[in-house]
Image (cartoon, grey):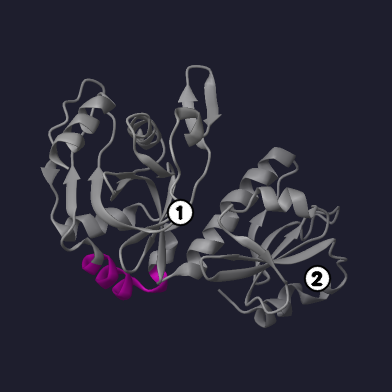
Amino acid sequence: MKSEAAGNEIYGPRFEKISWKVRFGFECYGVRIGIRADTLSLPILQEMLPTTGRITDFEGSKEIVSVVADEDKLINGLYYNNELAQKFEENRDSLMEILRDKFLIILSLASLPKRFYLHAGAFVWNNKGIIVPGESFSGKTTLVKEFIKAGAVYITDDLTILTETGELLPFPRTLEVRTETGRELQTAESFGARTLTEKIKLEMILFTAFEENAEWKPQILPPGQAVMKLMDNFYYRSSIGEAPAHIVRTLAALTSGIKIYTGKRGDAKSVIDWVAKNF
């Protein structure tokens, strides 16, 4: 990404004419970004940011996010260090969804190589941190929900933060469960579950996806293959290009010595029973 100064060569003159309605900083696990917007209010922007972070001063932020959504269609969009990251459509709901996603991408980029943002569910079972990597529609939310109902401590169902030393960080989000009529938001508390409030060591990875009538017969996955599959599940895959050699070495080190399994599953209960019996 270019610096703000470099980006100003293109957008600077237009940005200078913008009257920013809000300017604030946001810090999440050591990453601090400055956020400014010309029309959106602070409460709206805060709704899109992770609850694990905190609001800080705009001044001193090295990474700058600009949200331009006024009537000037030429420059409307989201900018990261003054580089255009996303043009905005007119649909307001679409804009909100784009911002939510882009803020997380920016955090994941700025966190490398100290922390990895993964498409993965995560929970604690018998004081062991377990993650279930997988893309959308792989069934990870359903599996995490069933583990929660069985007594697991909830970490997240969709986006997991894994540190370079192999620790899972709290990153609670509302579970988005698919139903016959669409999608329904549910909290871990609605299942009587506790939510993780401090980091915990990763001790198991389950690479599994739902398949109708599949029988859960897990196979041990070698660490080398696990590294490649983890990289396939980066929240923002293009981030691999930022430091590929370091990322591979770090993931290889943190997966060494932990239990890694792969296999298709049908009923979630079979996975829960297997984990309860073996761990």
Position of the C terminus, as image quadrant, is top left
| Residue for badge 2 | 15
Q: In the picture shown, does residue 113 fall above or below 151?
A: below
| Residue for badge 1 | 170
The local secondary structure at tag 1 comes to loop
Residue at 43% from the left image edge and 49% from the top image edge: 196
Residue at 24% from the left image edge and 44% from the top image edge: 206
Residue at 64% from the left image edge and 56% from the top image edge: 86
Rate crowding at label 1 as few (under 14), some (14 to 19) or many (20 or more) other CA atoms within 10 Å.
many
* Residue 102 x, y percent position in the rendering: 58, 55
Q: Is residue 278 left or right of residue 85?
A: left
**129 in magenta:** no
In depth, the one of 157 and 128 nearer the eye is 128
Cα distance in 3D space between marks 1 and 2: 36 Å
The overriding secondary structure of the stretch rendered in magenta is: helix
Q: Is residue 145 left or right of residue 87?
A: left
Rate crowding at label 2 as few (under 14), some (14 to 19) or many (20 or more) other CA atoms within 10 Å.
some
Q: Is residue 125 left or right of residue 218?
A: right
The local secondary structure at tag 2 comes to helix
Residue at 30% from the left image edge and 63% from the top image edge: 166
* Residue 19 x, y percent position in the rendering: 88, 66
Q: Which segment is the magenta one?
A: 241-253
Q: In the picture shown, does residue 152 fall above or below 237?
A: above
| Quadrant in the picture for residue 243 | bottom left
